[in-house]
Image (cartoon, coloured by chain):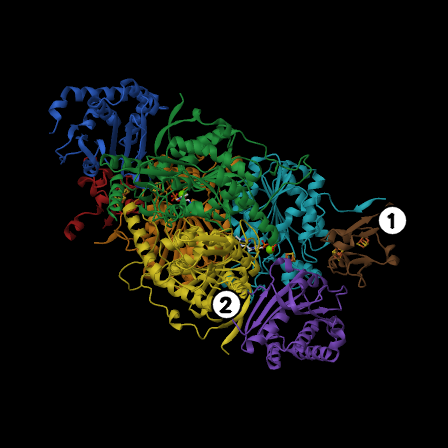
Chain colours: A green, B yellow, C blue, D purple, E orange, F cyan, G red, H brown
Amino acid sequence: MAKVLMKGNEALAEAAIQAGCRHYFGYPITPQNEVTAYMAKRMPEVGGVFLQAESEVSAINMVYGAGGAGARVLITSSSPGISLMQEGISYIAGAEVPCVIANIMRGGPGLGGIQPSQSDYFQATKGGGHGDYKLIVLAPSTIQEMAELVQQAFHIADKYRNPVMILGDGMLGQMMEPVDFDILKKEENKIEEKPWATTGKGTRNKRNIINSLELDPQILEKHNIEIFKKYQKAAKEEVRYEMTNCEEAEIILVAYGTIARVAKNAIEIAKRENIKVGLIRPISLWPFPEEPFKKTKDHVKAYLTIEMSMGQMIEDVKIAVNGQKEVYFYGRVGGMVPEPMAILEEIKKIRGKK
Amino acid sequence: MAKVLMKGNEALAEAAIQAGCRHYFGYPITPQNEVTAYMAKRMPEVGGVFLQAESEVSAINMVYGAGGAGARVLITSSSPGISLMQEGISYIAGAEVPCVIANIMRGGPGLGGIQPSQSDYFQATKGGGHGDYKLIVLAPSTIQEMAELVQQAFHIADKYRNPVMILGDGMLGQMMEPVDFDILKKEENKIEEKPWATTGKGTRNKRNIINSLELDPQILEKHNIEIFKKYQKAAKEEVRYEMTNCEEAEIILVAYGTIARVAKNAIEIAKRENIKVGLIRPISLWPFPEEPFKKTKDHVKAYLTIEMSMGQMIEDVKIAVNGQKEVYFYGRVGGMVPEPMAILEEIKKIRGKK
Amino acid sequence: MEERIIFAGFGGQGIMSMGLIMSYAGMMDGKNVSWLPSYGPEMRGGTANCHVTISDEPVGSPIINEATVVVAMNRPSLEKYEQDIVKGGLLLINSSLITIEHKRRDIEVYRIPTNDIANQLGNLKVANSIMIGVLMGLKNMISEAAIKISFGKVFEGKENLIPLNIKAYERGKEFISSISSQLVAR
Amino acid sequence: MEERIIFAGFGGQGIMSMGLIMSYAGMMDGKNVSWLPSYGPEMRGGTANCHVTISDEPVGSPIINEATVVVAMNRPSLEKYEQDIVKGGLLLINSSLITIEHKRRDIEVYRIPTNDIANQLGNLKVANSIMIGVLMGLKNMISEAAIKISFGKVFEGKENLIPLNIKAYERGKEFISSISSQLVAR
Amino acid sequence: MTVVFQKTKGLTDTPFHYCPGCTHGIVHRLVAETMEELGVLDKAIGVAPVGCAVFAYEYFNCDMQEAAHGRAPAVATGIKRVHPDKIVFTYQGDGDLAAIGTAETVHAAARGENITVIFINNAIYGMTGGQMAPTSLIGQETLTTPYGRKPETNGYPIKMCEMLSTLEGAAYIERVSVYDVKHVLNAKKAIKNAFKAQINKKGFSMIEVLSSCPTNWGMSPNEALKWIKDKMEQYYPLGVYKNTLEEEK
Amino acid sequence: MTVVFQKTKGLTDTPFHYCPGCTHGIVHRLVAETMEELGVLDKAIGVAPVGCAVFAYEYFNCDMQEAAHGRAPAVATGIKRVHPDKIVFTYQGDGDLAAIGTAETVHAAARGENITVIFINNAIYGMTGGQMAPTSLIGQETLTTPYGRKPETNGYPIKMCEMLSTLEGAAYIERVSVYDVKHVLNAKKAIKNAFKAQINKKGFSMIEVLSSCPTNWGMSPNEALKWIKDKMEQYYPLGVYKNTLEEEK
Amino acid sequence: MMEMMKLKQVIFNENLCKSCELCVEACPKHIIEMDKDKLNVKGYHPAMIKEENMEKCISCGFCAIMCPDTVITVIK
Amino acid sequence: MMEMMKLKQVIFNENLCKSCELCVEACPKHIIEMDKDKLNVKGYHPAMIKEENMEKCISCGFCAIMCPDTVITVIK
Ligand SMILES: Cc1ncc(C[n+]2csc(CCOP(=O)(O)OP(=O)(O)O)c2C)c(N)n1
Ligand SMILES: Cc1ncc(C[n+]2csc(CCOP(=O)(O)OP(=O)(O)O)c2C)c(N)n1
Ligand code: SF4
Ligand code: SF4
Ligand code: SF4
Ligand code: SF4
Ligand code: SF4
Ligand code: SF4
Ligand SMILES: [Mg+2]
Ligand SMILES: [Mg+2]
């Protein structure tokens, strides 16, 4: 049967395997442990490699090695573990090694808690590591979409030779929903030749080198510019978003991942009270979708960004809105989840203004 | 004699010592090695502790321990090393431990190069680590200001029980200028009691605990909100900036650190050609100064952000300008430094528009 | 149709499985479903709950703030979730362990001595399946066939447990259909 | 007054010290100064340079794009920095090591056989101090007293080297004042 | 009336959150008793790990810091360098100390950092639900070695005592267990020696305690103790691996 | 005409950037010769460190990856797990391998990761200008131990061979030097053994090479070789510390 | 309270008990058992010694030494 | 070229030489010295063997073995 009931974490793992990923490196951390467990079981079944590294620092550098050697490779963790990977991620981007990194976010800062959170948005989209680089960041909102985006992620990573991040939260990782793997686009799973990979020179007449060092500033600048050309391309081709009820909306909510689902509930409740509310759901957090804001700015009164953070994506919303309309914020943190009624309250407050 | 000729890195170290810092933990990395060398020499002379850790990960956690134990503590590194500290920095902010962190930036991403760069702006100001937290980020532009801001940094760190980052670049670290330590405000160097520190319970009737863990989302949320109250206070009290020739400027440059100096040269050259150009130099990068943009937006035609990056601070400039005026960007990366003439070219291009 | 069910009790009572059985069955019936567990170390010997939504429409938030059904398997669960039930919603109380009274007067409430019934069946662990039977007896949200398949799915690898659980399920249905009227606490 | 001087040569020629001596002296004279070295492992056996600005105004960028003076101690330095000199600016060439011709005709150029003079003084290492003397002989940007103190400062810990370096400095001055006119390559 | 046994003042009144029969509780008590008996509670600063003992700061009746996963020895180093005359200890699991914290552990030992490390080797990641630890035994089934730990892919268990005792900075290293009364009493003695080494400024001391995780081993608490004795102790021989205290005598 | 000695094809034509007399060059050559002689150049994938040997990817005539500081064994692990039949080696300095990369080194060894590690112990951080390394000798003056390395504050030098040979996954561990012809030849033999261990799928192999850093030691190249012999070798005894190759015979 | 303590030799802080039975195994006199009739605040059957068995106690303290949750005080 | 090689026994790839003198120390016949009259492209005085000393060479290869910069080829 096509549909299976799966946890987000499991769907993530299974989607990766179906995308041809045969190398997984990771280190246990709640709330993404199901990925590790699933991979430990499944990888040997499909002749793949599951390796529990001694730390996230190690794991991300194994990913660098494996990705550089030509494999489709996945690593997953949660907030503190992702912080430990920042140097490695910068290296991977700098050396143009494709890989998929998933962050199943939990409450911070520090050890924080293990309940869902979206407070690593900045880290994911602006670059938690040093230097000028970008991750392409995809934020699924359902388990089906998790499976879909994970497969796209591998494709995109290879296309741009750049790390792609799946940004989910503990709720998405832990919850179960039906997934249909059969309906996913299979062409994403075709793995193309990687003539640049370190596979041993063999009969190739040129050595392959994976590297991010360049002491000559002029050449290093050129390298940076080359990388940013890829990002410009991605900014055109990889923008993904969903718009719900935006056509006549007076107020538009902006939310991603699981919180977009809460927002949809709020829209329904608002409808009952005859308040027209819409939703812009960025699916690609980088490149951040600016288009839907352009489309809506004429009829909308204000935007309300809702996050499980103290206010992070709101900065991108502000930049997209560019002062044309007011941008408001409502957030819950530390594992608390915004409730539809509370969102409605905020909507009413905004309507009350002016 | 009051004035001494010093490298930025040395001034950083000496200023810390004069601010009562007696604990330094670090790991060698170019272009900040002079700090390590200076501290290795000086700390034993003043009865302080210099410890070369086994890694930046270790070093930042030593800082957590020492800061939590009540010491004024400094750590310095450069880009890749700072990336490795991101988990630790998030812990330090989460546990409300004061400390001063300096990043003498070099070209990235990855191993990159060792020439000056400003491409860790995002990491410093948005939070390279996980969770909702902020560093107070100060960016000196001269060696004298380096000394001044380092001393303020210790004061601010203690005042808010939060890490403060000094953001410089390789040029600032390596260059020499005269410094006058005598004219610095000495009151910043008074160290206040830290009744919260882990000093051994002694006769205290309450145990002191340094911690960032809180499994209950409600309490963790409260903790986050408390921390952000401090940030709101800082956003009022710690904003620092400099405005040059802004009153009648047609175009205003926005630049920080060493690049603000290059910008000043460009202003001089422009003056010769009768082009009125001003400069907003954010000194605190977080809190980012919005006020000077409000002050200038009526008469200015456009803002031109200049960075040694592919465009990072420009996002904060855009948010501050909020669509009121155009915001342009000119940047060099990988160790290349914008030249005054090139900036002038950009200015002319902007003037040509519309 | 949208049912939003909170199952709650302590670890070991098979709370997660209750949710899973309903979710699988809902999926089998072509409905949209979501299952959201509480997670983390606090579960160790502590409380456990899961939120299950079964709906004709795509499921919005998997978190249930307004439950159509609450199944309370122990006292803290009753105290915690009673207030979250929508007006006219359903509250099932495991009266074997919960001696206190419920407070709401605008909902339908049933008290079922599930542990006692389970004991009669010779295995305390099937209390959860009894409750599923009760729920199905009261609310016809999913097909009988789907539930049966679902039991098979959830007990995969422990097939020997299926017959007893199905029996418990039937007992729950019987129990509620025979004496439901007396139990209505309204 | 603002002098923007680039000292360039290879490692071991005392390039950094030349800049330091001028910077210290400038500071001593109450001027604003900045000294910016090239740095990093590429210096190992490679080229070295430093940018020194001495000014009545606060120093803008420490990077010198338009030099008022370039001191080229070896051939690659000449080739690299000649173009950065402002019109009317000054170029000092260590003719002991640089045999090629300079190209600019809109600047003042002097060729000084510093290594040879240094050899005469019995120590090749003082070539840099000779060049400082030449520079001071040509451009009176700092006081003599400040320069002398500055030598003391830069050779702190190696005081025994001071007399010879001061001597070299004087020799440089003499050299240029006596025969400067013949050397002008314009 | 003689008190044969009562709860030490080294522990707070907060009840442990550990699973039934988890030996973390026993070791907590031994450390606390040691500190009380040595009279150092008022000058002790402990460092809690990330692992099941993450809440150790709630239990030890002294100042405490909660460290990032694996970094307790670095944190302790920071504290000790600020307060060289205070007593600083860490309490860490095998994932914390022997996996992610390997570098911090090795270098604290190499530096002869004058701290005491209590190392709970339960051959598993308890807190995260039972994944392989660096110390998991060959063949041991865990969440991440569902087919049993295989040396070809998962490598071999690390013997920390053996490894660290090659370092000159290590002053006192002993491996003990707590699977019966005799061994608990011996563990106590070892822990006391470790703290004494610190008090005498000898350098780095570590006590490795072979411990149980009944929950993730899938055993009853008593079965788990038996497993320590029958399985773990075979691979991890008990005993003193380094002792510079003796030199004094 | 017989060629007694000529440059190996295992090296590219790029001239080394190392300082005059730096033994990095000798060891590069030995590794390259070994690969050529074993016929594995076409299936070798090397990992360069961060350290003076950072440009190793320019020199070894095979596919190469440049790793982050200290992470070469992790990178090599990633590569080896993708290409288990290729020959994967790292080349690392003492800061890289024994300081920041301690955990990666220890765990690659513990896992018995079938890779070869060439470890250049020159008792200093060469690339960054001469700071203390974990292997710097007691009393040694460096940029960060300007008063000499003191055990009380800086701890003791780490003996990696001794430490790693306590691990079951380590298949071949030897310490050699290159301070004279005899030792260079012996070093070559050791490196060959290490690669053979990998070819025979024995597990982790490491050769520690006591090396010189004339620049940062402030010595002439020949003085530096003498210092290796007189000072370093005293603290770091040469020899085979682990050898599972022998078992075969 | 003091009175009580004098009478008893082994005191269980019942509500801390997690029913792990380590004390049961440790007691050389085999006099400790779980109180199946009682559930403590945590929901466990606490350990106990029946009145009639208390006299068999030799105050060795083994039970307390093995108890991971500091449930037991032993007085002689 | 081949002609030349036959004549010589020890060939220095002069421009690679960094004047470290490790070969000088290694040569059992003490026939290697620095060519003080020559600077190579890197600015070093390269190692050399004077014509008249070449015959003393025993082709042991020690010089090449110690040379860190693969300057030396030894042919017999
Ligand atoms: C950086 C980071 N990585 C991973 C985790 C998740 N984590 C928490 S505890 C733990 C392992 C605990 O095992 P151990 O140290 O053996 O302690 P035990 O629970 O067995 O006592 C892990 C991996 C984390 N909190 N932080
Ligand atoms: C994360 C990080 N920290 C620090 C550095 C700076 N760094 C470059 S090389 C090096 C040490 C090199 O020493 P070693 O490994 O002994 O190699 P050697 O140069 O002596 O051969 C350091 C600390 C870096 N590049 N990255
Ligand atoms: S999970 Fe294991 S180690 Fe953790 S408290 Fe439970 S029994 Fe103890
Ligand atoms: S600095 Fe030292 S290790 Fe590095 S190349 Fe020079 S001599 Fe060799
Ligand atoms: S003190 Fe000894 S004899 Fe008495 S109950 Fe405890 S273990 Fe048994
Ligand atoms: S050992 Fe302690 S917790 Fe366990 S059963 Fe006995 S009294 Fe209860
Ligand atoms: S081959 Fe031997 S004898 Fe000939 S020059 Fe070289 S070292 Fe000397
Ligand atoms: S050993 Fe090599 S580099 Fe050194 S002097 Fe001899 S030939 Fe030149
Ligand atoms: Mg453990
Ligand atoms: Mg080294």
Mark 1 residue crowding within 10 angstroms, few (<14) / some (14–19) / many (20+): few
Please state which amino acid type lies under the numbered disc 2: Ile
**Mark 1 → mark 2, Cα distance in angstroms:** 61 Å
Assign the N terminus of chain A to one quadrant of the image: top left
Pick the residue in front: F3 or A81: A81
Residue at 24% x, 49% y is G73
Q: x, y (%) of residue F231?
A: 63, 60
Please state which amino acid type lies under the numbered disc 1: Met
**Cβ atoms at labels 1 and 2 below 8 Å apart:** no
Pick the residue in front: A31 or A223: A223
Please tell me whether residue F221 is drawn above or below residue G74 in the rendered image. Answer: below
Q: Which residue is mark 1?
A: H4
Please tell me whether residue F231 is drawn above or below residue D168 in the rendered image. Answer: above
In this picture, residue E246 sits left or right of residue F23? left
Ligand 5 visible in quadrant: top left
Q: Which residue is mark 2?
A: B143
Q: Chain of mark 2?
A: B
Residue A131 badge: none
Q: Is residue E49 visible?
A: yes
Task: Please tell me whether mark 2 sits on a helix, a strand or a loop.
Answer: helix
Task: Please tell me whether mark 1 sits on a helix, a strand or a loop.
Answer: helix
Q: Are marks 1 and 2 on the same chain?
A: no
Please tell me whether residue D139 is drawn above or below residue B23 in the rendered image. Answer: below
Residue at 74% x, 80% y is D178
